[in-house]
Amino acid sequence: MFEYAPAPESRSVVEIKPSYGLFVDGKFVEPADGGSFKSVNPATEEVLAEIAEAGSGDVDRAVRAARTAYEKVWSPMPGRDRAKYLYRIARIIQERSRELAVLESLDNGKPIKESRDVDLPLVAAHFFYYAGWADKLQHAGFGADPKPLGVAAQVIPWNFPLLMLAWKIAPALAAGNTVVLKPAETTPLTALLFAEICQQADLPPGVVNIVTGAGETGRALVEHPGVDKVAFTGSTEVGRAIARSVAGTRKKLTLELGGKAANIVFDDAPVDQAVEGIVNGIFFNQGHVCCAGSRLLVQESVADRVLESLKRRMAQLRLGDPLDKNTDIGAINSAAQLARIRELSDAGSAEGAERWSPPCELPERGFWFAPTIFTGVTQAHRIAREEIFGPVLSVLTFRTPAEAVEKANNTPYGLSAGIWTDKGSRILWMADRLRAGVVWANTFNKFDPTSPFGGYKESGYGREGGRHGLEAYLNV
Amino acid sequence: MSERVAVRKTYKLYIGGKFPRSESGRSYLVQDANVSLASRKDARDAVVAARAAVKGWAGATAYNRGQILYRVAEMLEGRREQFVALGATADEVDAAIDRWVWYAGWSDKLAQVYGGANPVAGPYFNLSAPEPTGVVAVVAPERPALLGLVSVIAPAIVSGNTVVVAASPAEPLAAITLAEVLATSDLPGGVVNVLTGRIGETAPTLAAHMDVNAVDLTGVADAELAAELEVKAAENLKRVLRPAPADHDWFADPGVTRMTALLETKTVWHPKGV
């Protein structure tokens, strides 16, 4: 492997305050009945900032602020003016993208290459896209005069902190709702910087409120009787609990949950391209991706060749400092997630699958996990059934397209799938049969604000992105 | 000559294209007839039949589904008097037939109206298309028994879903008669399955069933039961249509939301290149 000189991105572009309050009604405020917690850099375990923890009284204050802003300001405002605020926000995100990217990598552990080239461009594009819908809702296919729902409670995960914020806030605001958003407790910093951007854009107070905290804060928000809409991205387990908690209410619910996607490689696929797709599918963002291609289904006749090439490619992956521009694989987001990845990987070995990782030196401090593949995996193994949410790939084989479909669909999840083949008719035949919301053919992990994203079955319901994404925030 | 003795009809369940009695052997007297009192086992059997029918029905062409649904309307038209004799008003029967025709025409238009190309920022083909969610369990409205039933079944099956429907307990004869219409309209067995009996007995089994993809609680009048069913549905994250308001006007334009609520959107990407 080549030696690379370090090429670190400067962290001086971003100023992190020692502590952050809650963003309620346009101002940063101290929590009235909550405490605080620390956000750490997962690559170094250094404490980045002290974060306010919102209690139920704080959540109530935020929901009231959102209600007032909804009734007095935001829903009566003409769509063209809502659009202009969203365009402003999109522009400020572009202008401050370096700062946001560095902050995201510091707080989340993802490589700067990804936060800079994937997350941030998609965040800005998402606000641009939905800004344009704000004054065109009557043309969106939801009737002549679709109405917003009211106050949206939004709870987002730690894997794409700012991107998930954009997926939630942009369509909600475009449709005329106001929001109370809770970022994940391990990655609150870019959401709090986004709050400053709302101030900079002169967004009317109360339209966006950010309450920080862990599960209890999220529960208080979702169960608050004053919210009309709940949107959640995260684990299927928490999604189930939320679906139970809104039962019997009139709250509209959309859920984007876990996945265990099959990435299917046929014997006629160009091996080098497929291998790039496999690597992207499972090692992008350390595998902290709900739509990750975590089950490789490779046709038996080419399995050896594909695996040999995959191992060669994996040996070239550079793991380390997320702020280094050469880094391919950054830090695992938290000690808890690292423990989960280790537990499932150990189960893979214990159940008889064969584990392999390239020679890979892990930094001494921080949370790290080497890129790993398991071969000899059966459908009964835990590592073939449960979402690992880490850089761990389970390899299974198949002989016929029908068998590939059976195995791919043999999961309670249904978020995404990949197909690698040179034969067009086979792609379309497979795509028809895969029970998944997104099918990537001869590509993987592609996202766009115009393209609806979301799952079948226990991967949740509702779509984010595109015209479809508006439905979650309208009374239809 | 003495007056002719009429041949009476036995009203039974409709499961997998057949008309079985309840496996429990139970019946209840309603509308002057002994009607099967479906058990939890009948509900599970109906789900098995509905699941078995998904592949063929969802896999049929939209044109074919539209043809079959239109055929159902033709059969309904021929039985107008029969439904009136069972208690429906002539207006209700007409509205039910017209509604069935309206939905039949949607089969080959849904994908055009609710799918389409997405202009992504890159060299990719990107297409979103709606697909049926799978097996849908439906609690039909108590009244109007025929129009309400048609208004919940047709939007579910037009896109390729299959249904298990719990019919109005107070007026189940319209549901069984509709099943006879369906059985003679080339609709494959199992696409629609009809249970008669107590909602409190069948609905919890259907809401909790792990091989059901969605529940339509439209006809659940008891708010507490509706909440309980929604909690059961959360176990495998079924799509949930909540109960209709008590004053819902079944004669009004139904809109598209009953169809779209039971669809999944699949988006396919492929690179462009030479």
Image (cartoon, rainbow, N blue to C red):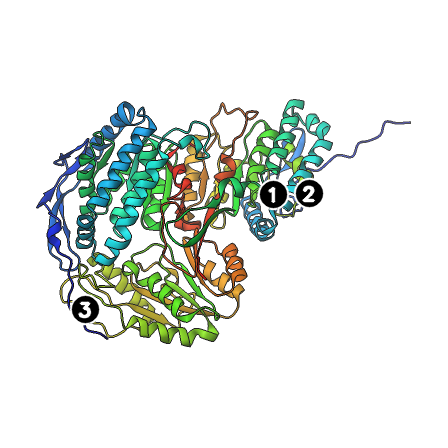
Q: Residue furthest right?
A: B1
Pick the residue in front: A270 or A70: A270
Contact? badges 2 and 1 (CB < 8 Å): no
Q: Residue furthest left?
A: A18
Q: Residue at x 39, y 61 (%)?
A: A385
Residue type, mark 3 in image: Leu
Contact? badges 3 and 2 (CB < 8 Å): no
Chain assignment, label 1: B
Mark 1 element type: strand
Q: Which residue is mark 1?
A: B192
Chain assignment, label 3: A
x%, y% of residue B190? 61, 47
Q: Do discs 2 and 1 share a chain?
A: yes
Mark 3 element type: loop
Q: Residue furthest front?
A: B274
Q: Which residue is mark 2?
A: B183
Residue type, mark 2 in image: Ala
Residue type, mark 1 in image: Val
Q: Which residue is mark 3?
A: A362
User: Gap between marks 3 and 2, in whole Å?
Assistant: 66 Å
